[in-house]
Image (cartoon, grey):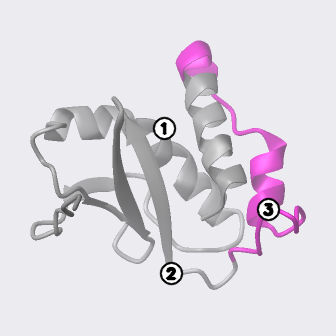
């Protein structure tokens, strides 16, 4: 995933935090998903998985959205940094707006996205 989409995720999270019950998805995210913004990506039609790098509390991890299973798999080798509750809170906006975006290009996904850690993610060593 490119830097522009990651910035869109940050903006969407901030929008959700400030608007609470009136959260809407900005049109530029739909343009991205539909491939109208070619400098930032390709259309999502036919997409089965989406990988997103996430920065939460100065800690990086990766999530994989599996559309068929309606599950966000979390790849985090350092499980001591974030509890399951923290992960779910940080990923709340992603679990909300990714299904809406996916449905706009006819990708089948449930509204209730589950967040699941993947055991066995390899922790890297700095040499």
Q: Is residue 126 left or right of residue 31?
A: left
Residue, disc 3: 40
**Residue depicted at 75% across the width and 50% down the height:** 29
| Residue 10 point in image, percent of width and height | 59, 36
Q: Quadrant of residue 76?
A: bottom left
N-terminal-most mark, 2 or 3: 3
Quadrant (top left/top right/bottom left/bottom right) for the C terminus:
bottom left
Check if residue 37 falls in the magenta segment: yes
- Is 92 in front, or is 107? 92
Quadrant (top left/top right/bottom left/bottom right) for the N terminus:
bottom right
The reply to whether discs 2 and 3 touch (Cβ–Cβ < 8 Å) is no
Extent of the magenta region: 17-44
N-terminal-most mark, 2 or 1: 2
Q: Is residue 59 left or right of residue 98?
A: left
| Residue 4 point in image, percent of width and height | 72, 51
- Say the numbered circle drawn on residue 93: 1
């Amino acid at each position: 995933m490119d830097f522009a989409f990651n910035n869109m995720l940050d903006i969407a999270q901030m929008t959700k935090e400030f608007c609470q019950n009136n959260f809407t998805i900005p049109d530029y995210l739909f343009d991205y998903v539909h491939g109208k913004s070619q400098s930032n990506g390709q259309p999502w039609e036919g997409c089965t998985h989406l990988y997103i790098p996430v920065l939460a509390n100065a800690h990086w991890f990766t999530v994989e959205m599996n559309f068929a299973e309606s599950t966000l798999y979390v790849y985090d080798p350092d499980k001591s940094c974030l509890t399951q509750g923290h992960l779910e809170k940080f990923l709340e906006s992603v679990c909300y707006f990714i299904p809406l975006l996916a449905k706009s290009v006819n990708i089948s996904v449930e509204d209730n996205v589950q967040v699941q850690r993947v055991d066995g993610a390899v922790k890297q060593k700095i040499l």
